[in-house]
Image (cartoon, helix red, strand yellow):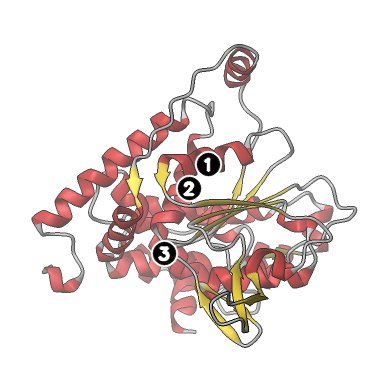
Amino acid sequence: MSKSDGEVVSETDRDAMKKLQTAFADIKRQLGQVIVGQDMVIEEMLIAMFSRGHCILEGVPGLAKTLMISTLAKCLSLDFSRIQFTPDLMPADITGTEIIEENRSTGQREFKFLAGALFANVILADEINRTPPKTQAALLEAMQERQVTVGRVRHKLGNPFFVLATQNPIEQEGTYPLPEAQQDRFMFKVFVKYPSFAEEFEIAARTTSVQHEDIKPVLTADQILELQQLVRKVPVTDHIIKYALAVVRQTRIGEPGVPKFVKEWLSWGAGPRAVQNLILGAKARALLHGRAHVTTEDISVLALPVLRHRILTNFTAASEGVTTDKVIRRLLDETPTKEGDLEKDDRFKKIFSS
């Protein structure tokens, strides 16, 4: 395959691949000074960033979600902004507002735009489910369009632009859960889980004594933009695309070839954006692991963070204790990974012909 086909073949691209792997190791090492464990969470955040995506991090209080994100920002030479979402937060508080200012030289009054907290490269949207839908919608416009609208004027945001939102799953009172259609704007939904015994022992020992942290920037904004372009050059075979499509299309109830358990447990399936994010994320993961090609393993590893917020379980699933993760794992178990096996299976023939 030639470079025009999208393959990473030039010396410049190979050098960029090595820089990405080195940066990945350096960032993990820097984060390791502050964060104990959570390797998969860190990897998924970096995959999203290099894919130009955004993340929701969900976990109970005290799992260092906020600390992890703020430390990641320190590892990158980027502007960082933390927004604490509250029930009284208004859209103008995050997008910015126009103020009337007097021109001292002419004495005339004129409007001046005062930029809000969204005008940074890395945004920590802390407890996004605590703010009203209007403010959530303002954030989502910024994520999707990479701009904010104030009055009738659109203001472009900086590049790179990366939103990491956190939400607390255990408190529902006084919260405004993001609708599923809006969660689809996030590339990944990442679960931050409890640490193991050994990790929690290390956390207890480290955080109750004097700490000496020396976080140094690893990547600049220009380097991140170059790496984001490199991700899109990674080639994918037709088999990989078919495998991603097979996994996603099986979530859509009412379509031909969909497994019986999906029809029993789901009320809604994932859309085309899930396939796009699966493939882009797989490309980034391949590069982080030192490969210039994508495998089915890259797709299957990222299926959970890509799909868990894009499929909706029904009452039957809830009554049986079935989660979206359980549905996704079963789909992966029942989807052939070897090239040619998908085309031989009658069920997948129906899926591909629909």
In the rendered image, residue 45, in percent from the top left (x then y), is placed at: 49, 48
Quarter of the image holding residue 26? top left
Estimate how packed mark 1 is, as few (under 14), some (14 to 19) or many (20 or more) residues with alpha carbons within 10 Å: some
Say whether residue 267 is left or right of residue 145. Answer: right
| Vertical placement of residue 120 versus 352, above or below | above
Q: Amino acid at mark 1?
A: Val
- Residue at the image position 39 percent from the left and 37 percent from the top: 27
In the rendered image, residue 2, in percent from the top left (x then y), is placed at: 11, 69
- Choose the circle earlier in sequence order: 1 or 3: 1
The foreground one among 308 and 238 is 308
| Residue at the disc numbered 3 | 159
Q: Amino acid at mark 3?
A: Asn
In the rendered image, residue 274, in percent from the top left (x then y), is placed at: 51, 68
- Residue at the image position 39 percent from the left and 63 percent from the top: 280
| Pointers 2 and 1 in contact (C-beta within 8 Å) | yes
- Residue at the image position 44 percent from the left and 69 percent from the top: 276
Q: Is residue 249 visible?
A: no
Query: As drawn, which residue projects farthest toward the right?
Result: 173
Describe the element under mark 2 as helix, strand or loop.
helix
Spatial CA span between label 1 and label 3? 23 Å
Estimate how packed mark 2 is, as few (under 14), some (14 to 19) or many (20 or more) residues with alpha carbons within 10 Å: many
| Residue at the disc numbered 1 | 41
Quarter of the image holding residue 118? bottom right
Describe the element under mark 3 as helix, strand or loop.
loop
Describe the element under mark 1 as helix, strand or loop.
helix
Q: Is residue 236 visible?
A: yes
In the rendered image, the quadrant that contains the N terminus is: bottom left
Spatial CA span between label 2 and label 1? 5 Å
The foreground one among 261 and 283 is 283
Q: Amino acid at mark 2?
A: Glu
